[in-house]
Image (cartoon, helix red, strand yellow):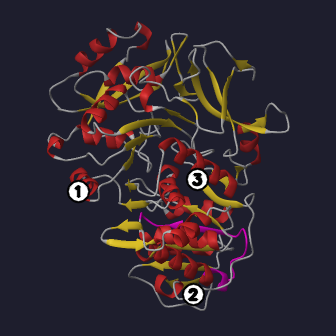
Amino acid sequence: MLLNHFLEHSARRLPEKTALVFRGLRLTYRELDDLASRLSDTMRAEGVRRQDHISILLENSAEAVVAIFGVLKAGAVFSLHHAGAKGQLLQPLLADARTRGLITDARRFETLKEILPQLPDLKWVMTVGRGPSAASAGAPRLLSWEEALRGSAAAPPALRCIDLDLAAILYTSSTTGRSKGVMLTHLNMISVADSVTQYLENTEQDIILNVLPLSFSYGLYQVLTACKMGATVILERPFLYPYPVIDLLVKERVTGFPLVPTIAALLMQLKDLSRYDFSCLRYLTSAAQAISPRQIEALRAMFPAAKLYSMYGQTECKRISYLPPEELDRRPTSVGKAIPNTETYLVDENGRRVTEPGRIGELVVRGPHVMQGYWNLPEETARRLRPGDPPWEKHLHTGDLFKMDEEGFLYFVARKDDLIKTAGELVSPKEVEDALCEFENVLEAAVVGKPDEVLGQAIYAFVVLNEPGRTGEPEIIRHCAARLENYKVPRSVRILTAMPKTPTGKIAKKEL
């Protein structure tokens, strides 16, 4: 089984079923598979061979989905980059990956021209939309999307890959330095999709609304799992204007809605959702940064018929754990237990397993979904993939600190690098953030450590309010003082109109 077989098998089984909806365009499985095959044929005619690297720089769109499966059908490896990425930041990634082909928007192409001479392995660029379209004789060769789809849908298959071949290099979102290319095989990605569809109980009747960027693995897997099951995925651009998305959710009778805390915060600001019928919505999923108990309570009130799956994962293995919805009331701050066919355990600073409930340790993951390593970064790879038990296996050391309760449920504490050491004590930013979010008027909160001559680090908090002007810093600090030990209470609380965010919707703490 290869990743592109998800689409091919569903096209044979359900050819006339709607596979993809994007802004009025509806593609059946037969049509989507046909377009991907045509693109694959063109890429092979342009010299693409097994395991060549192809970069995709597109916003959420039908073309982006066609590009992903077209690359896979050609036996090549795809990388997705955020559509807003700057050329100067992209150039080292594309050069390092020895990118052979680039698929991008015609308008973006104009801003990328300056980096093309610095990409010696780039042979061609395909552009989507209005803009440069004439084929050029120079290097890189330039083709329009229309030209790219003139290939044959009946062309013989590419040199066959096996499931140990790379399917994708997915880049980690980075707020502190260069993004790292996570190498994932077909087997890695299929193993994740198998587990995700098991615990979400996905079927071909599901209709999934995805507003997350496909360059974010959480968004990408909405498309992959839908194609695996023969379900329908509705693509939208980022969740900036909530009401059109809510209208679409109701109109299309959506059954699955993945979200991140940013989306939850926006939904909590809406005042009149009771007039909508959300009875078709079967499940919500939350991943990326942890969702607060207050947000969980608000989401359950908004969507009473939906199960809420609180999950945890990393690009390096996509998904690690999920909390069964029936456990949500008892353990609202837990991210649950390992997903099917995955083992997790905690280790101390010396690498020894932590077995005592409540003791903090670094989370380690073992399973068929764990990455092969970081592209061209052997030292970084060795730090994260280390010999385990059995010693011939490499286990993923996540860099995240967790606690585990008596029944084996996991609780996120902090990134190892994010822990704040103040007055000789270690403080988890999440614990302070959860206390801040319990304050009725706080919509979002983030906590960072700032160098301090006396304390080592002082705790500084940033908040966004539901109703600006109604709450001041003294009230918020008093609220924290009533719930936290003295050394955990923020030294200062700064009120913002909005949090700085990464392209994946996470709060950019480096900017704070």
Sequence-earlier tag: 2 or 1 = 2
Q: x, y percentage for residue 429?
A: 46, 24
- If the image is split into quadrants, where does the C terminus sit? top left
Along the viewing direction, whichever of 190 and 135 lies nearer the viewer = 190
Q: Which residue is mark 2?
A: 151
Q: x, y percentage for residue 272?
A: 14, 42
Q: Is residue 432 left or right of residue 218?
A: left
Q: Secondary structure at mark 3?
A: strand
Residue at 35% over, 55% down: 238
- If the image is split into quadrants, where does the N terminus sit? bottom right
- C-alpha span from label 3 to label 1: 30 Å
Q: Amino acid at mark 3?
A: Tyr
Magenta-span inclusion, residue 44: yes
Q: Amino acid at mark 2?
A: Gly
Q: x, y percentage for residue 151?
A: 57, 87
Q: Is residue 115 visible?
A: no
Residue bounds of the magenta highlight: 43-60
Q: Residues within 10 Å of mark 1 (few under 14, many from 20)?
A: few
Sequence-earlier tag: 3 or 1 = 3
Q: Which residue is mark 3?
A: 171
- Residue 320 sits in which quadrant? top right
Residue at 18% over, 43% down: 273
